[in-house]
Amino acid sequence: MNFPSLKELGGKAKSAFARFPITLLWSLIGSFYCIIIVEQDIDVLFDENNGILLTLLLGISWLIATRFLIEQFKTPNKWLWVKGVTLVLLVVFYFHLPDLDVHYGNDTFYIRFGLYFLAGHLFVLFAPFVFKWNAAAYWNYLKSMGIAIVRSGLFSGILFLGLVLALLAVDSLFEMEVDEERYFQLFIFCLGVVNTWIYLSDFPKDVHQETQVHFNKAIEVLIKYILLPLVILYLIILYAYGIKILFQWELPKGWVSYLVTALAFLGFTVEMLIHPVQKIVQSRTMNKYHPWFYILMLPLIVLLFVAIYRRIADYGITENRYFVLALAFWILGITLYMLFSKKRYLKVIPLSLFAIAVLSSFGPWGAFSISKNSQLNQFKKVYAKVMANNKVATGKEYKQLESIIDYLGNLKAANVLDETVGISMNEAFLDTTKNKYNFYDYDMSEKTLDSVGITVVPEDNDAIFGA
């Protein structure tokens, strides 16, 4: 890694601002906004400014990706309106956010932010190649991105540590008390301004012209001696576990779904790293990686679906299970695409995951609507069974009803149970002394079940309520 001179850094900084003026202004405004808030009162940084901070964080990756998207056209200036659309969407996101203090404890809004944050970074991975494709140019683009991330992180990290040591020296040698907030403000400046500026300064503009692959030794070592051994290790563990459950004739544990998902992500990453040179490098493992990795993934995908089905059949869909199921279908789709497609456009990997992240964040098909409806149906099913048993529940049934009430209460959607239980859930959760809803009291679900007369099988009482 070559360290540039100050003159070179200055020139790159100017070029970066000319190329990404809106992105860098967004980053500057956001960083100094946070610095000012920290100066006033660090305790209110996240408590009273969540909406603005979430929007500022979200905007950087989306604005970068939008610029990369525009640059692939012959006349980029004609497409500048796309930036305007991105800014409008960010404003819409901000005003769509509810009062996060009022909705404290409800993770829906943070999950939705996480999905958009992930989608923005995935957008960066394929933005210059939405309408154009060249496998070698795409590989060089990803390589340039990786180098830019490492360089910006290294340089801004060194600057931050150097400035921190300077402040500590002033504090110690001259007995000048330095407020703790200064260190956090330095971190914000180095991350939001320096890191972003260096990253954008390092990024090549004419990415479609870079069609010669430079597969250096460091990347080869990373793939051959770290990533591929990890892929093989995960395959051995999962196949050994698959053989174990076949012999014992038992359903797989839910945790195995996370390991299969991790293996798929690792395997797809290796594919993106070796795709242009797979058949020309001197490595039998890399030469045979496609199609054998995807063939070996097929039985594990079956294991993945069985593990997910077991959890959903027993307890219904929650946001976590929704995303795991969505990822399972994505993994299956990418695996089949890589096996049977002759073109194998690698941009399909981040692009399809981007689509899942965006589409799952809203609508009746989204994670939140489907999860809420699934838990409501699960509650009705268990509740009807308990009612048919003279309002006597097993320990497992009682715990499941409690869990669903807590879940819907945290979503501010407990009222969907009104018709089923025959009482107003909002009134049950209402604290009349404070005139607000106590959706987070640990015993509210227990009180609700008690109010409709549900009891527990005597031998399960200790397991539920303690001895």
Image (cartoon, grey):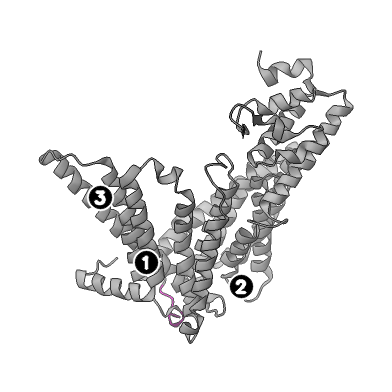
Point out the frontmost of discs 2 and 1.
1
Amino acid type at mark 2: Arg
- In the image, 383 versus 340, the foreground residue is 383
**Mark 1 crowd level (few <14, some 14–19, many ≥20, 10 Å Cα):** some
Q: Residue under circle 1?
A: 25
Residue at image x 66%, y 57%?
362
Left or right of 319 on screen, residue 183: left
Residue 272 x, y percent position in the rendering: 52, 66
- The residue furthest bottom is 74
User: How far apart are the two marked residues, 2 and 1, measured between alpha carbons?
Assistant: 38 Å
Residue 412 x, y percent position in the rendering: 66, 41
Residue 335 x, y percent position in the rendering: 65, 62
Specify start and end residues of the magenta stretch as a single range: 208-214
Point out the frontmost of discs 3 and 1.
1
Report the predominant secondary structure element of the magenta stretch.
loop
Q: Residue under circle 2?
A: 344
| SS of the residue under disc 3 | helix
Q: Earlier in the sequence, mark 3 or mark 2?
A: 3
- In the image, 91 versus 217, the foreground residue is 91
| SS of the residue under disc 1 | helix
Amino acid type at mark 1: Leu
Residue 299 can be seen, yes or no: yes
Q: Residue under circle 3?
A: 161
